[in-house]
Image: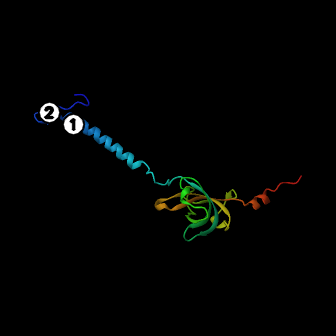
Amino acid sequence: MSYGEIPEQQGGQVNMKCTNQFLAVATSASVAFLLVLAFAPSAGAQDKGKSTQTEAQWVSFDAAGETITVKVKKPGKGPNAKLLRRGKEVAFKVKKEGSVLTRTTVAINGKKGEIEEINAGKTVFVYWRLLEGDVMFARKIDVIFSEEEFEARYKPVDE
């Protein structure tokens, strides 16, 4: 019997070989479909693995709560930028200890720094991602020069 033929009835019973082939194909197709559904991201899901870059003004650091608070200047670039609004304060979870992959790193004017060294009002770039439960985790914080600081440091040399 070839694929697609109607099985013959023999004594009131359908040819079992054809029925088994059909069940095997149907089961394989069902399993494949379920795997696609299980591992495909849903349309409304946020990307929790990639970082989002946000420009903000530093407000405070709460060591006990392991959080920083910033006021958003530009929601930025990245998969979760739409979660932030310009002018609103937002809190990010930070982790001072651990490997470079699991802790929050800080760079102040291009050099390694500590969270406690950041002064209120400074412009920062926060690179963050979502953790479980939609917790915003700051992976990296870059503190940048203000225009005055930049000009003072790199003022033109008079000839």
Of tags 1 and 2, the one toward the viewer is 2
| Element marked by disc 1 | helix
Residue at left offset 29%, top offset 38%: 25
| Label 2 sits on residue | 9
Check whether the beta carbons of the residues at disc 1 and disc 2 lie within 8 A of each other.
Answer: no
- Quadrant where the image shows the N terminus: top left
Q: In this view, does 98 lie to the left or right of 150?
A: left
Name the outermost residue toward the bottom.
Answer: 64
Residue at left offset 56%, top offset 53%: 78
Name the outermost residue toward the front.
Answer: 86
Which of the 4 image quarters holds residue 16? Answer: top left
Residue at left offset 54%, top offset 70%: 65
- In the rendering, at what x and y percent does residue 70 appear? 61, 65
Query: In this orientation, which residue lies closer to the viewer: 112 or 119?
Result: 119
**Please, which colouring scheme is shown?**
rainbow
Residue at left offset 67%, top offset 67%: 121
Name the outermost residue toward the top.
Answer: 1
Which of the 4 image quarters holds residue 71? Answer: bottom right
Q: In this view, does 16 lie to the left or right of 45?
A: left
Name which residue type carries label 2: Gln
- In the rendering, at what x and y percent does residue 45 appear? 46, 54
40, above or below 14, in the image:
below
Which of the 4 image quarters holds residue 157? Answer: bottom right
| Label 1 sits on residue | 19
| Element marked by disc 2 | strand
Q: Which of marks 1 and 2 is nearer the N terminus?
A: 2
67, above or below 101, in the image:
below
Name which residue type carries label 1: Thr
